[in-house]
Amino acid sequence: MFSRVLIANRGEIALRIIRACRELGIETVAVYSEEDRNAAYLRFADETVCIGPGQSDKSYLDISRIIAAAEIASVEAIHPGYGFLSENGHFAGVCRSCGIEFIGPCAEVLDLVGNKSNARKCAAAAGVPVIPGSDSLAGTDADAMETARKLGYPVMIKAAAGGGGKGMRSAHNDISLAGGLRAAKAEAAASFKDSSLYLEKLIKPARHVEVQILADQFGNVVHLGERDCSLQRRHQKLIEETPSPAVTPEIRRRLGAEAVAIAKAVNYTNAGTVEFLIDSEGRNYFMELNARIQVEHPVTEAVTGIDLVKEQIRIASGERLRFSQDDVAPRGCAIECRINAEDPSCDFKPSPGRISFYYPPGGKGVRVDSHIHSGYVVSPRYDSLIAKLIVHQDSRQDAIVCMRRALEEFIIDGVQTTIPLYLEILGHVDFVNGRVDTGFVERFLSR
C-alpha cells in the first residue's frame, strides 16, 4: 500500500480522496491554485502545495507543475480524480517515467479508449453492439453528409476525444449537419485540443445507462451493476440512480457481461464506467468507456457497500480484487442529485459568488459530498458543481420521498442552485413512474 499520495484535483472530489486516504492510513498532498488558497478542505491534507494561478491551464492542467509538486513532496502515487488530467494518457505516461504510480489505467489504455472512435472498434471486436455510425473519423463536410445520408437522419456528431458532453451536436438534415460540424469541431479543439469528429445514428427515445467496473492488474474484472443517467441536459448529467427502473434482470445480466468483455478486450485496470444507450425495444448499444472515477460513483457505493476510491488506490498499489462477481450483492435504491451553482430559470446561467449560508440535510440514508461552507466563494473559473446529494433507501419510492425531503432541507443562500428544479422533477409523474429518457429534461423545461 502507498504511504503518500498527491491529489491532482480540487473541490469535492479532492476532499473525497483525502478522506479515503486517511482511512487507509495514507498521507495526502493536496495541490491548489491561488484561487483555491482558502479552501477549507485543504486543512485535512497532510501537506499542501500551490501550483499556480487560478487559470486551470496554468495550475490543475499543468503537468510540469503537478509533477514538480509530486517530486518535492516525495509521493509514491497521484490520484487525478475526475475531469482535468484524469483521462490524459500523456500525464499517466509522465507519471510512470518519473517513477510515480498513476491511480487509474495505464497510458496506453487511456490513449486507446480516450478516442471514442477507436473505443467503438474495440467494443465491436469484443462482440458488443455499437450504435450504427461512421467506421472512421468524419473528414470533409461532403464525406460527413454522405455518411449521414447512409445512416439516415437524425445523426449525432461526436468529438473523438470527447467527454462531458462537449463536442456533441445533433443534426436532422444537411444544413444542420454543416453547422453542427463547425460548432462541434471548434468546441472539441478548445476542450480537448483535438478537433476530430465522427458520426453516429441518433437513437431517440433512449435511456442512458452505465455499468461500473473494477479491474485489477491480474486480469480480474467485476461489474457493480448499472446506473441510470438519463436525466440530463445538453448531455450533462443531472440526476442518477441505481438500479435503473428500465433495466430488466436479463438486460442487467447482458450489460454486465458486455462491460466486463470490453474491459478485458482492452486490458483495462482500475475503476471505469462502460456507457450504453438502451432504445425503446430494450436493445443496448455501447457508447464509450470512461476511464476514471465518475461524479455519480456514490450511488453505486451506497447499494454495494464498496468504497470505489479505496478500491482504486488498492488496485494501483498492486493488490488483487478482494471480492468476486458472486460477492457483489446490491441492496436497495440510491439516487444522486448534482447540486450546481446555476440558475435553471435563466438557461442554467452560472451563478458564482459568496455563499452566505450553508445548511446540508441529514438523516438516515442521506449523504452529502461537498467542499463548500458558509462564506465559501464559488469561482467562475471552475465547474459549477458544488455538492452531490445522495440518498439510499430500501425501495425506489422510499428513495424519491427521502430525496425530496433532503432537497427541501438543503439551504444554500447567496448563489442560485439547481435544487428547485430537482424538487419539480422528482414530483413529476413520469419520473416517479420511471418513464424518462434522455430528452425528458429538455421537454420538461420547454413545457
Image (cartoon, rainbow, N blue to C red):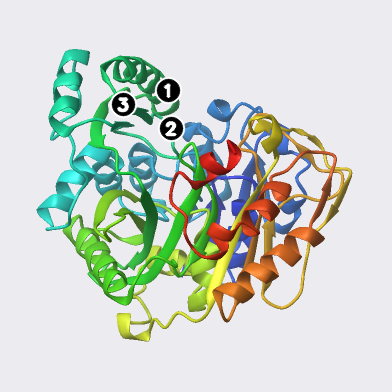
**Mark sitting on residue 149:** none
Disc on the earlier residue, 1 or 2? 2
Residue 187 — which label? 1
Residue at the farthest right position: 356
- Distance between the alpha carbons at the discs numbered 2 and 3: 19 Å
What residue did someone put label 3 on?
Answer: 172
Q: Is residue 359 left or right of residue 99?
A: right
Q: Nearer the viewer, residue 296 or 405?
A: 405
Disc 3 crowd rating (10 Å Cα; few below 14, some 14-19, many 20+) is some
Question: Which numbered disc, 1 or 3, marks the residue closer to the eye?
Answer: 3
Front-most of residues 354 and 23? 354
- Residue at 57 percent of width and 45 percent of height: 9
**Mark 3, secondary structure of its residue:** loop
* Element under disc 1: helix
Q: Quadrant of residue 177?
A: top left
Q: Which residue is mark 2?
A: 166
Q: Secondary structure at mark 2?
A: loop
Q: Amino acid at mark 2?
A: Lys
Any part of residue 444 in sight: yes
Identify the residue shown where x is 13% and y is 35%. Answer: 135
Q: Position of residue 197 (x, y in %)?
A: 27, 27
Residue at the bottom extreme of this rendering: 327
**Image coords of residue 109 (percent x, y):** 26, 49
Q: Is the Cβ of the residue at disc 1 closer than 8 Å to that at disc 2?
A: yes
Rendered position, 443 above or below 168:
below
Q: Which of pointers 2 and 3 lies earlier in the amino acid sequence?
A: 2
Q: How many marks?
A: 3
* Mark 1 nearby-residue class (10 Å; few <14, some 14–19, many ≥20): some
Marks 1 and 2, how far apart in space?
7 Å
Quarter of the rendering containing residue 334: bottom right
Q: Residue, x 40% and y 18% (percent of image)?
A: 183
